[in-house]
Amino acid sequence: MTVLLEHRGYEVVTAKSTTEGLKLAGHGGFALIILNSWFEKGDGIELCRQIRSFDTRTPILFFSSAAYKADVLKAIEAGAQDYLIKPRGIEALIETVEGLTHPASRPPSISAEAAIKMKASK
């Protein structure tokens, strides 16, 4: 995913834990956060809830191999706007990222995964 997004002009910064991801998200200024369901010492659903406690505007996209309907529903209930399932979701990743990051009210920057945070370099 990182290589694909970098190839499309995005700068990608990763965080390996929910603590690190929360710290990155807390700095704000991003147009998108991409989360996985699992992190070292935590899970993406809880991280999503924590981010939503201080940031209700930044879109959150889950890109995860957790493929059960219950996983998707938990992510949406926690505050995510969309959910793509690995590896099939890779085809829709760029389209989804661009759709979430380029509405008229958003700046042309992108943040991402508590394991990946991005800024558009377009």
Image (cartoon, helix red, strand yellow):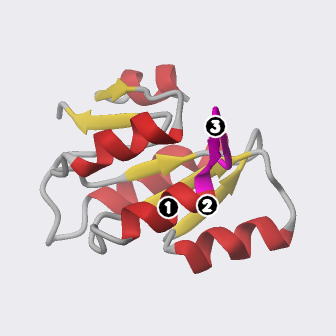
Q: Amino acid at mark 3?
A: Lys
The mark nearer the N terminus, 3 or 1, is: 3
Picture quadrant where residue 111 is located: top left
| Vertical position of residue 80 compared to residue 110: above or below | below
Q: In the image, what residue occupies the spot 82% across and 73% down?
A: 70
**Residue 22: image location, x then y, percent:** 38, 46
- Dot 2: what SS? helix
**Residue 20: image location, x then y, percent:** 41, 34
Residue 111 in sight from this viewpoint? no
| Vertical position of residue 94 compared to residue 17: above or below | below
In the image, is 57 to the left or to the right of 107?
right
Q: State the separation of the CA atoms marked 1 and 2.
A: 5 Å
Find residue 29 and name its label: none
- Dot 3: what SS? loop
User: 95 or 42, which lies in front?
Assistant: 42
Q: State the separation of the CA atoms marked 2 and 3.
A: 13 Å
Q: In the image, what residue occupies the spot 55% across and 66% down?
A: 82
Q: Amino acid at mark 1?
A: Cys
Q: Which residue is mark 1?
A: 48
- For the magenta stretch, what is the residue range? 37-44
Q: Residues within 10 Å of mark 3 (few under 14, many from 20)?
A: few
Picture quadrant where residue 21 is located: top left
In the image, is 93 to the left or to the right of 43?
left
Find residue 41 and name its label: 3
Find residue 45 and name its label: 2
Q: Residues within 10 Å of mark 2 (few under 14, many from 20)?
A: many
